[in-house]
Image (cartoon, grey):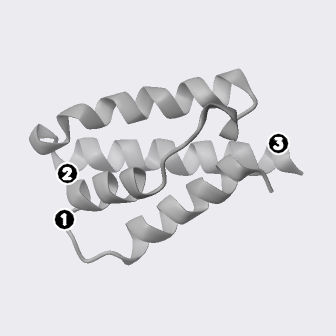
Amino acid sequence: MSHGTEKLGLIIEMLATSQDSIQERLLNAVNSNPFLENDFPEEDLRKEYMDFKNELQNIKEMSSEEASYIISKIVSLYCESCKRDC
């Protein structure tokens, strides 16, 4: 399992187990598991991660639906990363 896939798994676990608001869970989970440039050797996965990471800059104004959408993107990225790790 790649380093990026492991970190995404940790993010998903934090999202699922925290009692905070969905926005706080998202921000805390991503900030607690920072990615390095080489965590995603595939350029498309790295770009996808950076795209949703940039969306978090407006987390305080984000609705629950918007935060849920980003979480679904994280889960999709995790699934794609797992497929490529196999």
* Rendered location of residue 16, percent (x, y): 42, 71
At horizontal 20% and vertical 51% (from top left) the residue drawn is: 64
Of labels 1 and 3, earlier in sequence is 1
Callouts 2 and 3 close, C-beta under 8 Å: no
At horizontal 59% and vertical 56% (from top left) the residue drawn is: 7
Vertical position of residue 24 compared to residue 13: above or below: above
Residue holding disc 2: 64
Image disc number at residue 80: none
Judge left or right: residue 78 versus residue 15: right
Q: Nearer the viewer, residue 81 or 63?
A: 81
Q: Quadrant of residue 61?
A: top left
Of labels 1 and 2, earlier in sequence is 1
Distance between the alpha carbons at the discs numbered 1 and 3: 32 Å
At horizontal 41% and vertical 58% (from top left) the residue drawn is: 32
* Rendered location of residue 71, percent (x, y): 41, 50
Distance between the alpha carbons at the discs numbered 1 and 2: 9 Å
| Mark 2 Cα-neighbour bin, 10 Å: few <14, some 14–19, many ≥20 | few
Callouts 1 and 2 close, C-beta under 8 Å: yes
Give the SS element for disc 1.
loop
Vertical position of residue 52 compared to residue 27: above or below: above
Q: Amino acid at mark 3?
A: Arg
Q: Amino acid at mark 1?
A: Ser
Residue holding disc 3: 84
* Rendered location of residue 63, percent (x, y): 15, 44
Give the SS element for disc 3.
helix
* Comparing labels 2 and 3, the label whose residue is closer to the camera: 3
Residue holding disc 1: 21
